[in-house]
Amino acid sequence: MMGKFYFIKNIQGSLYFLLLLFITPSMAQQAPLHGAEATPLQTKIILENISDFPAKTELCIATIKEDSVNFIGLKLENDTIIYCQNKNYLFEIGAITKVFTSTLFASLVIGGVVKLEDSITQYLDFSPKQTQKGGKEITFLSLANHTSGLPNHPPNLVKLPYYKIEDPYAVFGKTQLEDYLKHKMKLKFPPGEKYEYSNLGVGILGYLLAKSTGKSYKRMMEEEIFAIYHMPNSALGEKYYSGKLAKGRDKKGFIVPPAHFNAMLASGGILSTAEDLSNFVLANFSHDYVLDFQRTKTFSISKEMDVALGWHIMKSGNEREWYWHNGATAGYKAAMLMDVENQKGVIILSNISGFNPIMEKIDLLTLELMESLY
């Protein structure tokens, strides 16, 4: 970024004041004051973190305090920052999908459909190649909290015809998943003994939840999650082009085609909006029984990090617990963070590529904005 940006960056004031300098008259008429304001500290944090974001970056930031949500929409165009209203625009949220897969799992556990310690073999009509190691069996719980012993990705994935690194699961459908389970499944360590992040494990969890209920993952997500937690714009699959979509971009700013998760849908296939995700965070502040159960610690990774069902629990020296997940695809980067006890949260959706190293600044921006809420 050059010229105008660095000049404006040094001005102290509200974000709305800063951004109004870049809004054209026609855009200003469409942009209400509500939802465009931030404290001077938040303004400073945002501008410092986005200063070297690529051209055509689009962000939607939601900051949450108790029952109040503030939305800040930004676009970077022609070396300027433009305020926009995009709280209802869809972004791919990547691995944040795992949080919602575990919400579904938690609701089925509470409903008595499945149990945390159910073996995966109970719901399969074939015998997987390996489900035990060291006398310990893969369970639904171990799939949800990344202690299953499975690798991050299917080991045969890159050898499949038409595999592309920017859309790896496009070639991994139900046939390939079942072939993996029957002929290639191999555990790296005894389930439940160690944490190792696994996209594959959560993909299998989604497959098994569908098996256990006789409903598709997509149908369950729409009926049991999106409908219940007031997420009307969130989508899987075919709604991709029917809603308002923030276009994903690669490192050079070119538009990226949508990601295809196929059999791995439960691991990363949701598109959502900042407003929908804010509604979900607010539901976590309301003593919802399913969500309270989901946030229960299930494994300790380190002194600084535990894991619940889908959530990672960040522990700080001031005894705060932050529930965290982020996600990235070839055209998007997202992060979601909440403090349930103090009822604070930050959500950031962006069209920065998961292959762009600068995407890490989305996580940093999320953490710094969270600190600004105290």
Image (cartoon, grey):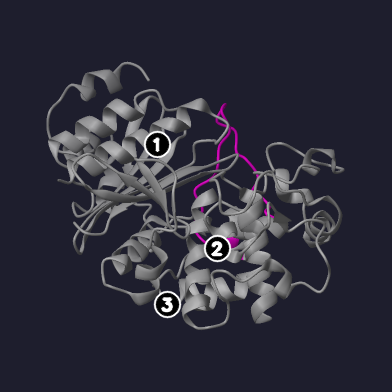
Where in the figure is residue 230, as x and y percent of width and height? Answer: 39, 72
Q: Is residue 81 above or below residue 123?
A: above
- Which residue occupies 59% across, 63% down? 236
Question: Earlier along the polypeptide chain: callout 2 or callout 3?
Answer: 2
Q: Which residue is mark 2?
A: 141
- The answer to whether residue 315 is magenta is no
**Spatial distance from mark 2 to mark 1, Cα to Cα?**
29 Å
User: Which of the two residues, 374 or 239, is positioned nearer the viewer here?
Assistant: 374
Where is residue 28? Give x, y as percent.
26, 46
Mark 2 in CB contact with mark 3 (< 8 angstroms): no
Instruction: Please name the residue that numbered disc 3 is placed on.
Output: 228
Image quarter where the C terminus lies is top left
Q: Secondary structure at mark 3?
A: loop
- The crowding category of the residue bearing disc 2, from other C-alpha atoms within 10 Å (few below 14, some 14 to 19, many at least 20), is many
The reply to whether residue 351 is in sight is: yes
On screen, residue 304 versus residue 122, left or right, reads: left
Badge 2 amino acid: Leu
The spot of residue 262 in percent (x, y) is: 71, 58
In magenta stretch: residue 241: yes
| Dot 1 amino acid type | Ile
Among numbered discs 3 and 1, the one appearing first in the sequence: 3
Q: Residues within 10 Å of mark 3 (few under 14, many from 20)?
A: few
Label 1 sits on residue: 362
Closer mark to the observer between disc 2 and disc 3: 2
Q: Is disc 2 in contact with disc 1, using a CB cutoff of under 8 Å?
A: no
Question: From the viewer's perspective, is 204 left or right of 271?
Answer: right
Range of the magenta residues?
239-261
Q: Quadrant of residue 130?
A: bottom right
Residue placed most toward the observer, 305 or 88:
305
